[in-house]
Image (spheres, rainbow, N blue to C red):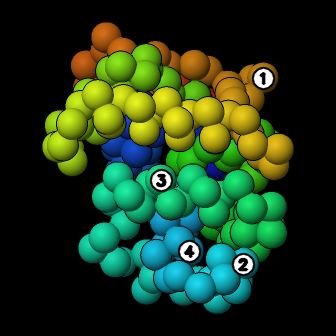
Amino acid sequence: MIFTVAIDGPAAAGKGTISRAVAAQFGFRHLDTGLLYRAVSAKGGDPVDAARGLRPADLDRDDLRSLAAGQAASRVAAIPAVREALAGFQRRFAREEGGAVLDGRDIGTVICPEAEVKLYITASAEVRAHRRWLEVGGDEAQVLAEVRERDARDMGRDTSPLRAAADAVVIDTSEMPVDEAVRRASDIVERALEARR
């Protein structure tokens, strides 16, 4: 069965946690597409060449989850040729047999507009910055400034800006425990699967 769950949203909204949980619950493969862009920026050199030469092993680096890696990923993600180089990989992953969950910034709008389920996970900038600060430490006010800067870059870029797909279900996790967010997302996926049976 080909079944794609597209999960989009800004940094630290909870989309990765929800995506991994949904994939595990339904036995689907999972791809954190942000890791692709983080790996491209971490490889250094020309970002387009790095994107074209990206290998699965490049996603296993220990330094891809840092705040700096996220900021760098946001910058290379704004390069249209980088996005184009990575789009085919993501689309193939999404439409292979067995089901897939992809999380990112443009999955439901650009990569997989045909996805059977589209979710947009969001939270206030303040809540997201606090979550990120708990992960990485440092100056919380600086983390908030960086979250807002990244939001502006991701939402304002000309190519594949971050936005909810018109038919996405929006889940705001600002005041929601993670288990409830996962349950809501899982219920939506379950209903879509039932409709396919």
Residue 77 is at least partly visible in this image = yes
Q: CA distance from mark 3 to mark 4?
A: 12 Å
Numbered disc 3: secondary structure:
helix
Q: Which residue is mark 1?
A: 166
Q: Is residue 118 above or below residue 30?
A: above
* Nearer-N-terminus badge (4/2): 4
| Three-letter code, disc 1 | Ala
| Three-letter code, disc 3 | Gln
Q: Nearer the viewer, residue 43 or 32?
A: 43
Crowd tier of the residue under label 1, counting other residues whose Cα lies within 10 Å: few below 14, some 14–19, many 20 or above: few
Q: State the residue at coordinates (42%, 49%).
A: 23
* Nearer-N-terminus badge (1/3): 3
Question: x, y percentage for residue 5?
Answer: 59, 43
- On residue 40, the disc is 4
Q: CA distance from mark 2 to mark 3?
A: 17 Å
Q: CA distance from mark 1 to mark 3?
A: 27 Å
Q: Nearer the viewer, mark 3 or mark 4?
A: 3
| Three-letter code, disc 4 | Val
73 left or right, relative to 3:
left
Question: x, y percentage for residue 44?
Answer: 53, 82
Question: x, y percentage for residue 48?
Answer: 72, 78
Numbered disc 2: secondary structure:
helix
* Residue 153: quadrant of the picture: top right
179 left or right, relative to 119:
left
Q: State the residue at coordinates (33%, 21%).
A: 127
Q: Is residue 54 above or below residue 25?
A: below
Q: State the residue at coordinates (49%, 65%).
A: 38
